[in-house]
Image (spheres, grey):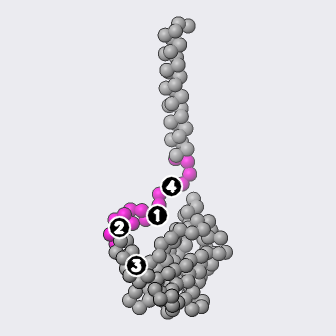
Amino acid sequence: MSSGAKWIAIVVAMLLGNVLAMVVLIGEAHHGGSRVLPGYYERAVHYDDQLDEETRNRALAWRVDVKIHDGVATVTAHDSTGAAIEHAHVHLDGVERARTARPIVGDLVATTTGEYSARLGGAGWVDLAITIDRGGDRYVHKLALEAR
């Protein structure tokens, strides 16, 4: 085999290797479920609303702590002075990050002063939005946490 033919064979082999690699990568990219975030487009369209919501949250300065343990979601809420938030409507809306993207949605009931709880499920990492309505005030706390 001549020297020129060797180089042509090497270039052709490299091109075929590249095509094979692309076929494998395309196949792997389409394997499994969709990884698109739920509500992505709606959140983008209402981005200004989210900025307004954050401004209201900062003005209220409420502190919210959330945990999910054995499927029970517990939210504790305190106002800017540190007093427990009582007589509020607390709603949790979330989704598991796992491939199933199972929703976690429900209203929590008061268990003690400033603490609200409900069995809603949830395992692994979850993205949550906790909405607390009391009187004319609305506080929305968004976070990601690991449910245990």
Report helix, strand or loop for mark 4: loop
Which residue is rendered at x = 39% and y = 66% of the image? Answer: 43
What residue is pinned by disc 2?
47
Report helix, strand or loop for mark 3: helix
* Residue stretch in magenta: 30-49
For residue 34, the mark is 4
| N-terminal label among 2 and 1 | 1
Q: Which quadrant holds the C terminus?
A: bottom right
Q: CA distance from mark 2 to mark 4?
A: 23 Å
Q: Is residue 120 left or right of residue 19?
A: right
The amino acid at mark 4 is Ser
Q: Is residue 71 left or right of residue 49?
A: right
Report helix, strand or loop for mark 1: loop
- Give coordinates of residue 48: x percent, y percent: 32, 69
Query: In front of the other: label 3 or label 4?
Result: 3
Number of marks in picture: 4
Residue situated furthest top in the rendering: 2
For residue 58, the mark is 3
Q: Is residue 120 visible?
A: no
